[in-house]
Amino acid sequence: MMKRLVIHPKDGSTSFLKKIYEGLKNITLIESGEDILENLDELIRTHDQVLFLGHGMPKGLLAVGQFGFNTFVMNASRVGGLKEKDNSIFIWCYASDFVRAHHLGGFATGMFISEEIEAYAMGVECTEVDIKISNEVFATAVGTALEQEMGNHELYAHVKQQYEPLVGTNPVVRYNWGRVGVW
């Protein structure tokens, strides 16, 4: 059974991402703790797969006040152990830029609308219901793929298959559709 490290800073606006890991067994969940960052390289090295979930930018996964005065949980200074893995999951806005910049392997999202302020910033007219449906379908699809131990390309295909039927009717899904991939 795969041993997974899930790094998901506590933040109510990303609680929908819990669907990704709530059905997984043998996980280590990290939501906060300044001392965790001191041991992050070791935690990454001793787990088969690492999932990074939350808000971010091209420079990394934001700590959102959960890891002391650190701005990021994952950034350029902490990628060492990830270079040895090809199955990591990076779900935050512009995670794919981070993955490409550091030559990492795994499933990643680009700019990804998950809340109203992001839709507004990207000029996507939608409702709260559109966002909620997009978040629910996406997180459920990723979680199901991980529960079934799908590899990167299978996971990607599964997410696309589950997400695609909504492209024509949901403007958030339409925007996010082309912003997931495997590197």
Image (cartoon, rainbow, N blue to C red):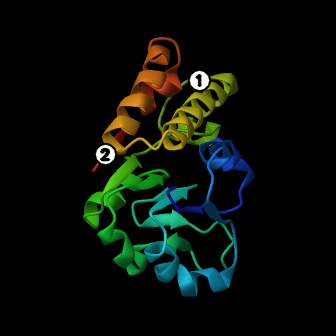
Nearer-the-camera pick, 89 or 154: 154
Type of the residue with mark 2: Val
Res 69 seen here: no
Q: Is mark 1 on a helix, strand or loop?
A: loop
Residue 152 point in image, percent of width and height: 35, 45
Q: Quickly name the residue at label 1.
A: 126
Residue 157 point in image, percent of width and height: 36, 30
Mark closer to the chain start, 1 or 2: 1
Identify the residue at horizontal 38%, vertical 76% (top origin). Answer: 81
Q: Is residue 182 left or right of residue 30?
A: left
Q: How crowded is mark 1: few (under 14 residues within 10 Å), some or many (20 or more)?
A: some
Instruction: Judge whether 22 appears above or below 87 on screen.
Output: above
Type of the residue with mark 1: Cys
Q: What element carries label 2?
A: strand
Name the mark on residue 63.
Answer: none
Q: Residues within 10 Å of mark 2 (few under 14, many from 20)?
A: many
Residue 131 falls in which quadrant of the image? top right
Q: Look at discs 1 and 2 and give the one toward the viewer.
A: 2
Identify the residue at horizontal 35%, vertical 36% (top origin). Answer: 154
Count of numbered tags: 2
**Which residue appears farthest toward the right when viewing the image?**
12
Identify the residue at horizontal 63%, vertical 31% (top origin). Answer: 136
Q: Quickly name the residue at label 2.
A: 182
**Which residue appears farthest toward the front when viewing the image?**
1
Whole-Å distance between the Cαs marked 1 and 2? 27 Å
Identify the residue at horizontal 59%, vertical 34% (top origin). Answer: 140
Instruction: Judge whether 166 appears above or below 160 on screen.
Output: above
